[in-house]
Image (spheres, rainbow, N blue to C red):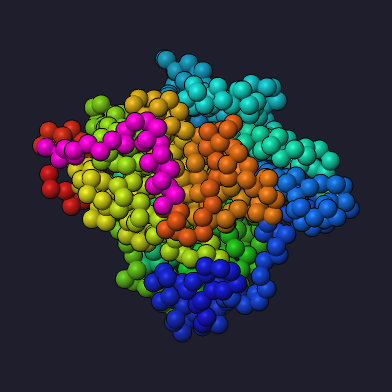
């Protein structure tokens, strides 16, 4: 089995131990994975495609544009900058649409829950009331479900809103940011509308000014970040519980030899939650035992995995790049999938084993898969039907290999509320201690490592960047498959404090928190927007996200959703660094993304290939913000005394035994 990659600069061997172990076994012989396909493609990517200057937006084309060559503009006269901007904007529209369609399902599920038509209930009443306030809903003397129903209906209306009012959640941003959006005319209105307008404006012969295209691309992305993604995160929390710190595990070693292994792969937690509930039903466990298994082992893949990891502590077996390898263990009875990031090749890999790929969503079917529609109004029954099919496969399991040692402890569940309690204590929850530790320099800044993993680039990137950052006392927030990769690297764990610079280690040890805080799935990047805004509100670090010593990266981005996220970060004032962007064939537009957006947005995109260079840029930008805030002075560092430790010590974390190697 070939386990090297080529075809692009910087590609390396698979470094992930569990993947290597599985791929070197007899059981996975002959399995073709994406790693093999990268290697065997034998052709490099088209320059026009990778530089963003291939246009297929009308049937006079396709037109391949070469910037600066007179005859090489589009038949319609479109320039490289216009074409690349249109393509980039369409990527953002597609990414936003994916988050939006996911969020809509969650809101509809929330409404059904409020009506009592689901197996779920409103779990976080406090959060419900806070969000109701944002939507102008009266909460006093009202039944919880009544408030929830009104909130759900108001939230749903924001998807299809046709009036020109900004989305309700924009009010949560800093006043300065809201003023910027207003001035630029990019405060999103209806969530769906911004996607539609983006598609219209990039149709042949409409918006041909790349700066103007980027205004709508920003509005569309903001409709995702502050609209759909934030709605999804918040309503899911209210319904399934806001995450609190808990221990769990990641990597392929979480599969169990003597249990029915079912992976839930995709994104929408409605299905995953129902499966979790159903897997605990006595008749399901009984059925598993009848087949000779000791129980049912539900594990996550990709972001749906992160959703149930955060709220239930269900282990995550794999991120995006390991989905085929998970199946290649031969130990999976069924891979249950819904939407997004499911590789078509999983059907082929599954064919070599007894494994069923079960599609569950009418929007996402695959030739060769078994389809069992997940019915939200009969969630438990649907979930049981899916589980039954999977359980009955157990007896058919043949040879298999589970890399049993490959499982890493993680402490997850860092919602923005948790960070509040963790650092502020149970009785005076606030971001004050975090801000104070940034101001006094113990924490140099905050960096988000988010997004996918990607077969084309070194799968060590996340780890290299994170290690470099924490060594330099930068606190890391992680979501998505990046968080899974960092978990596999052993960094999502209080014990990882030993890899930190001295002062960050001290904070982590005192609180008992990991230096890499797992904040959830990709829609949960909206938690980072709220956390950053809370830091601003707390005072002492400027008056907008753009003033914070904070920055984000999605080094191994693969999905269009990652670009939507990048753009809503930038349009919210946060710098981002990616390993590449499909815009290099258009000089002016590319420069506009990398520099020009600073003017209107107060932040811009950055690009660097090498992970260490990414970390260097991140630290440099953090230091520049510290300079601007006047907090970069070298002061004599005060060591924590007992009072300070007590002040920072978190009851919440101690509840889950997350002391870390604290010397308190
Ligand atoms: Ni985000 Fe998460 Fe993973 Fe990328 Fe795909 S699962 S929603 S898109 S690959 S991080
Ligand atoms: Fe070519 Fe213009 Fe049509 Fe694009 S829109 S395919 S550049 S003619």
Which residues are drawn in magenta?
A: 616-641
Q: Height in image: 433 above or below 283?
A: above
**In the drawing, does residue 116 fall left or right of residue 648?**
right
| Residue found 48% across the figure and 49% down from its top | 553
Question: Is residue 625 among what the camera can see?
Answer: yes
Say which of 338 and 68 sits in front. 68
**In the drawing, does residue 563 fall left or right of residue 317?**
right
Q: Is residue 327 magenta?
A: no
| Residue found 77% across the figure and 56% down from its top | 66
Q: Height in image: 283 above or below 650?
A: below
| Residue found 25% across the figure and 26% down from its top | 428
| Residue found 60% across the figure and 39% down from its top | 596
Q: Height in image: 548 above or below 411?
A: above
Q: Does the magenta stretch include residue 623?
A: yes
Image spot of residue 25 (x, y percent):
44, 82
Name of the residue lying farthest toward the left: 642
Image spot of residue 516 (x, y percent):
34, 50
Say which of 378 and 478 sits in front. 478
Q: Total label count?
A: 0
Question: Is residue 262 among what the camera can see?
Answer: no
Q: Quadrant of residue 653?
A: top left
Image spot of residue 435 (x, y percent):
31, 32
Quadrant that contains the C terminus: top left
Q: Height in image: 548 above or below 396?
A: above
Say which of 629 and 418 sits in front. 629
Image spot of residue 82 (x, y percent):
75, 44
Say which of 445 and 38 sits in front. 445
């Amino acid at each position: 089995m070939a386990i090297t990659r080529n075809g692009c600069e910087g590609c390396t061997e698979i470094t992930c131990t569990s993947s290597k172990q599985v791929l070197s076994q007899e059981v996975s012989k002959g399995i073709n994975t994406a790693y093999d396909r990268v290697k065997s493609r034998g052709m490099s990517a088209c320059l026009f495609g990778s530089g963003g200057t291939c246009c297929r937006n009308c049937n006079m084309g396709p037109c391949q544009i070469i910037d600066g060559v007179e005859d090489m503009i589009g038949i319609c006269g479109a320039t490289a900058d216009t074409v690349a901007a249109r393509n980039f904007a369409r990527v953002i529209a597609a990414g936003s649409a994916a988050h939006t369609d996911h969020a809509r399902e969650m809101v509809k599920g929330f409404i059904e829950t409020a009506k009592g038509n689901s197996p779920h209930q409103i779990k976080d009443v406090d959060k419900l009331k806070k969000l109701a306030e944002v939507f102008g809903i009266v909460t006093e003397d009202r039944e919880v479900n009544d408030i929830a129903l009104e909130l759900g209906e108001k939230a749903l209306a924001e998807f299809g809103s046709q009036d020109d009012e900004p989305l309700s959640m924009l009010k949560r941003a800093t006043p300065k940011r809201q003023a910027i959006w207003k001035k630029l005319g990019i405060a999103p209105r209806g969530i769906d509308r911004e996607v539609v307008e983006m598609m219209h404006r990039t149709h042949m012969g409409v918006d041909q000014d790349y700066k103007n295209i980027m205004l709508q691309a920003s509005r569309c992305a903001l409709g995702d970040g502050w609209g759909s993604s934030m709605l999804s995160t918040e309503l899911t929390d209210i319904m399934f519980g806001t995450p609190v710190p808990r221990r769990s595990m990641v990597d392929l070693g979480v599969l169990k030899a003597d249990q029915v292994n079912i992976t839930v792969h995709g994104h929408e937690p409605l299905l995953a939650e129902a499966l979790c509930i159903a897997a605990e039903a006595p008749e399901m466990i009984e059925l598993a035992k009848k087949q000779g298994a000791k129980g049912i082992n539900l594990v996550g893949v990709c972001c749906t995995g992160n959703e149930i990891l955060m709220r239930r502590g269900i282990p995550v077996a794999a991120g995006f790049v390991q989905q085929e390898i998970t199946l290649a263990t031969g130990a999976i009875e069924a891979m249950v999938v819904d939407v997004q990031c499911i590789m078509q090749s999983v059907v082929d890999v599954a064919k070599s084993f007894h494994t069923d790929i079960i599609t569950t969503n009418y929007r996402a079917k695959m030739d060769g898969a078994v389809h069992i529609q997940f019915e939200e109004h009969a969630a438990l029954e649907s979930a049981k039907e899916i589980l039954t099919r999977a359980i009955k496969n157990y007896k058919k399991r043949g040879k298999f290999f589970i890399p049993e040692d490959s499982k890493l402890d993680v402490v997850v569940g860092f919602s923005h509320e948790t960070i509040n309690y963790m650092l502020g204590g149970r009785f005076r929850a606030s971001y004050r201690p975090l801000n104070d530790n940034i101001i006094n320099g113990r924490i140099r800044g905050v960096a988000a490592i988010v997004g996918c993993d990607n077969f084309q680039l070194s799968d060590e990137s996340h780890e290299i960047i994170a290690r470099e950052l924490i060594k330099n006392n930068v606190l890391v927030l992680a979501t998505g498959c990046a968080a899974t990769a960092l978990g596999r690297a052993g960094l999502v764990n209080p014990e990882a404090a030993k890899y930190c610079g001295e002062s960050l280690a001290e904070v982590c040890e005192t609180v008992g928190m990991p230096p890499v805080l797992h904040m959830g799935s990709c829609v949960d990047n909206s938690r980072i927007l709220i956390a950053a805004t809370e830091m601003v509100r707390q005072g002492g670090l400027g008056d907008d996200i753009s003033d914070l010593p904070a920055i984000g990266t999605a080094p191994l981005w693969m999905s269009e959703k990652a670009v939507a996220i990048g753009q809503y970060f930038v349009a919210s004032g946060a710098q981002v660094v990616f390993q590449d962007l499909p815009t290099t064939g258009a000089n002016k537009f590319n420069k506009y993304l990398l520099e020009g957006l600073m003017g209107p947005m107060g932040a811009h995109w950055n690009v660097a290939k090498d992970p260490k260079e990414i970390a260097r840029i991140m630290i440099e930008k953090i230091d520049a913000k510290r300079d601007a805030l006047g907090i970069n002075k070298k002061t004599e560092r005060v060591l924590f005394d007992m009072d300070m430790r007590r002040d920072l010590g978190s009851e919440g974390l101690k509840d889950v035994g997350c002391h870390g190697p604290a010397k308190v």
